[in-house]
Image (cartoon, coloured by chain):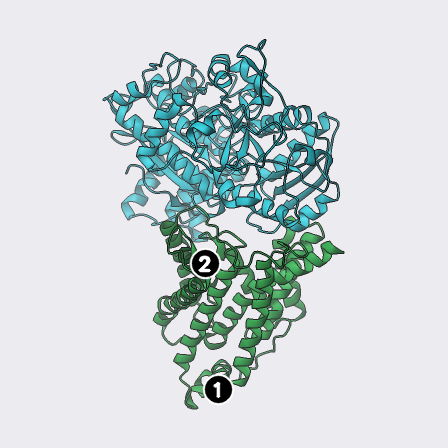
Chain colours: A cyan, B green
Amino acid sequence: MSDEEPIRSFEFPRRWPGLPWQRRRIEEQMEELSASGLDTPMNRREFLDASKKMGLSVAATAWLYPAFLAACGRTAEQQTPYSGGRFDVGGESGGETINIGVISIYSGVGAFVGKLVDHGAVLAVDQINKHGLPTGKKTPEGFPDFDAYQKQTTGGILGGKRINLIKRDDNLSAQVAVSALQEMVTRYRIKGLIFAGLYDDIYACKKLAQQYNIPCIAAYGDLYSVDQLYPKTDYKQLFQMFPPDVWGIEIMLEEYATKDRGYKTFGYLGDNTAVGAQGKRLIGETLAKLGLHLSSAEQYNVGDVDMTAQLSRAAGGKPNVQLIWGIAGDTAHALESLQRLDANYKDHETALHGPGWHPQIIGFEGGAAERTFAVLAGEAARTGTMSYWYQGGIGYIPQFQKAVDIFKQHFGTKPTGGENNPADAVFLFAHAFEQAKGTDADKVIAALENTSNEGGINFSSIAPHTFSADRHISLEKDDMVGITLERGAAAPTNPAYDIGTEFKQFFSPGYVGPTQFMRFNQEGLMRKHKDLYGEIMLKNGYGTQCTKVPDSRAPYGFKLTNACKIH
Amino acid sequence: MARFIAAVLSGFASGGIYSLLAIAFSIIYMTTRVINFAQGDVMMVAAYVYFLAVSKSYLGLPWPAALLIALIAGAIVAMIVYIVALAPLGKFDPNTNIGWILTTLAVSLILVELARLVFGEQQKTVAPVIKRIGSKKTLFQLTPQQYLVIVIGIVLALILEVLHSKTQLGRALRATAHDKATASLMGIDTNFMVRYSFLIAGVLAGVAGWLLAPIIFVSSNMGTLVGLKAFIAAVVGGIGSTRAALVGGMTIGMVEQLSIYGGAGEWTNALVFITLIVILLVRPTGLLGEALIEKV
């Protein structure tokens, strides 16, 4: 079953409890686990018996057993030191396919995330199954040679095995994600797992992933910011390619808001999930380091539509910056509420000195950096709304148009941004399977820890993701860029507003959407990506909005300043 | 003070939507003694139909025509809910046979999934019918659309109240609600009254969808939480009466907005449920509800 449609996950019983022979097979697997030395205070048989008394189906209890152990605060490692402490369901995936699990948000208010994941991961799987892995051939400018890759005719990995995605909806519940992981391991024997849903999913699943010894990549999940990423913990199976909130917040507040823009007062409005709680904590800590504090901290429930009351209270402190920490739809509603207060952002000067309250908006990357947000917010979202992402997946320079074309051929639409992470996660796994010469988890983890910049393993990203044995995050702080909301018809400014080379060249008139903004982090970008940033981006003006001032002494005949009224 | 007035007005606006759906819950409850858990999703379908009809990317009709289509769609979907979820159960005592809970919930889930499959995950935006009050875009921080919700919510509730207390049809409905068997003996077509109640509930859901679409984005799950809160509103007011549903809706809307005004934005949903519990403890039949005396 290739690229099957995502199925909503439920805790139990999931769906069809299975035919008798299927249930027997699961029981047999559990017997093998017991035989392999799993000796717990409540063993498998006792657990099944107790579960039957509680009326749970056999299949459901089989899936829930490890979760039950985890919930009891006992890991398999604690129980069975001599067996390696893992639920090794073992063996290769069936036949000629290798299953990779994906947990994302496919329904509800965050369903746009699932769409991004689908677009990115499905395209990557399709390309690998069709063309194999890229040979690493690059263009003279050092970019992946997409034409050469498209001409490769040997598909699959490990001698022609196809990759298959097993997709599950987290239903905006970490518990559901745990259940989905159980199912994917026991039923589909996944060899890798991509987390692309709630932050909470990976927090909730990490112990289970360790017990099953499943290599996991957080495409949209942040363990780094909460000090849960190896080597700070022993979850060696977990890797992160998602730009951590802590870096995004630090760079937006330190480099952009205070140093570049001179803002001094900050208000916060966030949702009541882990995203909001983590954002609030990290923002508070970052501001404290700068000798600043939040003038207001307000919350809302995910899905709320009217935040006027919260923002009215925030208005009392007249913050220069209003931080909004939530997903795209909620962020759009927050800006509509701001519009009702006639407090939309106008320009830098007004945000700083008034008159009235017109704060600049800095948002969570899953909200204000999404095109969905720009579409939903409409006129309420103004040019200059800021967020953050990392240097990667830039489709708006000529060198990457081929990738955009491939995407368009596949889905009939252009990428909206964010698809690159799920795509690159699939490529990372495929590369690791090849390096490991199989799907043995320990070897795959070792291979992931030895990913290199060479080899062109990433299809969509300019800057390949790399891990090492002591660094399970694929990025560095110098990779971070700003994301700014551009509108086709911005208000006239002095100096004249320049939306940047890439927009003029690639976007149709009236384009509204977020894109990279690099000026304030140019030192970091030059350190990390001198060739790319200096020669391609800076020289040609990509992502340098409204800041090019002629200067014959500067390397490319101009310098970048912060003399911009909008951002 | 302005903030407080804005919070109260917002409470009325939220309450307007809850009231409309709570009335729909009540009307169906009156004739069938069941709660239609798919009511919020009927509203969702009507909102999607309005979006398709009014959006320039699709039919691009003027809003009154689009509204008419949405109301018809609401009525049709409500009838489908009745045909699929309740009619197959035949004659049953809803107090002992609780199959209707599963069937209405199942239809609710099916509607959500169908909407997701047909319309996709992307939320849709709908332009408000009225964009300005005079020269102003907002008044006391509320948009014209929110004022429209308040006005239409109250006016419709009053019309239904009059309809059900002063007309032959209303008397027949109340007679059916009071004692179905006797009403039938008195010549009232109780089956028609059941279908009528679903029809009216569908139209009310259509109005709610039309009013709500420009305020929250149209999405497959837009009716889930709103429907749940409207059900709570119906219970808080005292299920089985239009007036009670109006009062219940306004109460829930006010609890929500005043809790946000008081700085407990993240606790609004919890406070709504706490309100329900407290009111049921103090007045088990709801604020305006009357105890039913079962004759044996």
Which mark is nearer the camera, 2 or 1? Answer: 2
Q: Amino acid at mark 2?
A: Ala
The residue beneath circle 2 is B47
Residue A197 image point, x, y percent = 47, 38
How many numbered callouts? 2
Badge 1 marks a residue whose secondary structure is helix
Please report whichever mark, 2 or 1, sits nearer to the chain's N-terminal start.
2
Q: Which of A217/B130 is in front?
A: B130
Q: Amino acid at mark 1?
A: Gln
Q: Is residue A473 visible?
A: yes
Disc 2 is attached to a residue of which chain? B
Q: Dot 2: few (<14), some (14–19), or many (≥20) neighbours within 10 Å? A: many
Residue A110 image point, x, y percent = 48, 43
- Image position of B181 with respect to B40: above or below: below
Q: Which mark is residue B295?
A: none
Distance Cα–Cα, label 2 vs label 1: 32 Å
Quarter of the image with the C terminus of chain A in it: top right
Q: Is residue A372 left or right of residue A520?
A: left
Looking at the image, which residue sits at the far bottom?
B186
Residue visible at 71% across and 59% down? B5
Quarter assignment of residue A185: top left
Q: Are marks 2 and 1 in one subunit?
A: yes
Residue visible at 40% across and 84% down? B189
The residue beneath circle 1 is B168
Quarter assignment of residue B104: bottom left
- Image position of A399 with respect to B169: above or below: above
Residue A548 image point, x, y percent = 56, 20
Q: Dot 1: few (<14), some (14–19), or many (≥20) neighbours within 10 Å? A: few
Residue A46 image point, x, y percent = 44, 43
Badge 2 marks a residue whose secondary structure is helix
